[in-house]
Image (tube, helix red, strand yellow):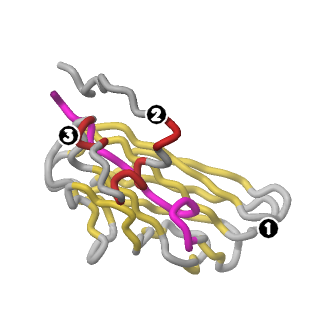
Amino acid sequence: MQLIAPVTDYIPASTLTTLGDMIVRGAALPERLGLTHMFHVYLSGDVVVGTGAWVDIDFDTVLYNLGGDFDIITDFRLEVTEAGYWFINLKVNLENPADGTQLQVRLDNNGFSTAVGQNVAGAAKDISASCCFAGEVETGGYVQGELRHDAGANRNMLGGNRIWTSMIGFRLPIL
């Protein structure tokens, strides 16, 4: 079984920026790679997050949502319409917590933590944490991005651009 289709023609690097830019511009690369389900979502602005408890991340902006699997209206999570093996990355930035503050992020796959990332603040400045999941998700299953911090007070989860707090993913094609 071949999981990823070979790309047989050359795409000059000078013509490409990011996969998201190519999809937004209507380029055919996803189809050439056999990708039919992929997404990139992020926060449009900062969101205040309380301390101590796990919190779902309600992504509110879609860069692309090929296949329509990411629910940006109701549950703010990946809701799989076609079973398969997925690669998903979550990145969260937290605004200027005190030294020693822990930021933890995780991907919840149908109620189970499947990936966890952590970072501890050093010099008082913004920190980020990320995690990746590569595995099977069944039809009707979901994957939710979550975070927790122990700053002792509310902190801003940074938004406003497509890389600060974001979640991206794609279903691997089976050919």
Q: State if disc 2 and disc 1 touch (CB < 8 Å).
A: no
Binning the other alpha carbons within 10 Å of mark 1 as few (below 14), some (14 to 19) or many (20 upward) gives some
Magenta stretch encompasses residue 135: no
Task: Give amino acid for label 1.
Answer: Ala
Name the residue that disc number 2 marks: 12
Q: Earlier in the sequence, mark 1 or mark 2?
A: 2
Q: Earlier in the sequence, mark 3 or mark 1?
A: 3
* Relative image position of residue 31 (x, y in whole percent): 23, 42
Tell me, for residue 98, which label it has, or none.
1
Nearer the camera: disc 3 or disc 1 = 3
In the picture of the structure, the residue carrying the numbered disc 3 is 84
* Residue 71, disc: none
Which of 159 and 92 lies nearest the eye of the viewer?
Answer: 159
| Magenta stretch: includes residue 161 | yes
Name the amino acid type tagged 3. Answer: Gly
**Residue 66 percent across, percent down from the top left:** 25, 56
Label 3 CA crowd tier, 10 Å (few <14, some 14–19, many 20+): some
Identify the residue shown where x is 75% and y is 69%.
96
Q: Secondary structure at mark 3?
A: strand
What amino acid type should be assigned to the residue bearing mark 2?
Answer: Pro
Residues drawn in magenta: 159-175
Query: Is 47 rendered above or below residue 64?
Result: below
Query: Residue at image x 22%, y 37%?
Result: 34
Observer-side mark, 3 or 2, equals 2
Residue at 51% from the left image edge and 47% from the top image edge = 131
User: Is 64 drawn above or below residue 88 in the view shown?
Assistant: below
* Residue 2 on image: x %, y %: 21, 21
Please report contact status of discs 3 and 1: CB closer than 8 Å, yes or no: no
Residue furthest top in the image: 1
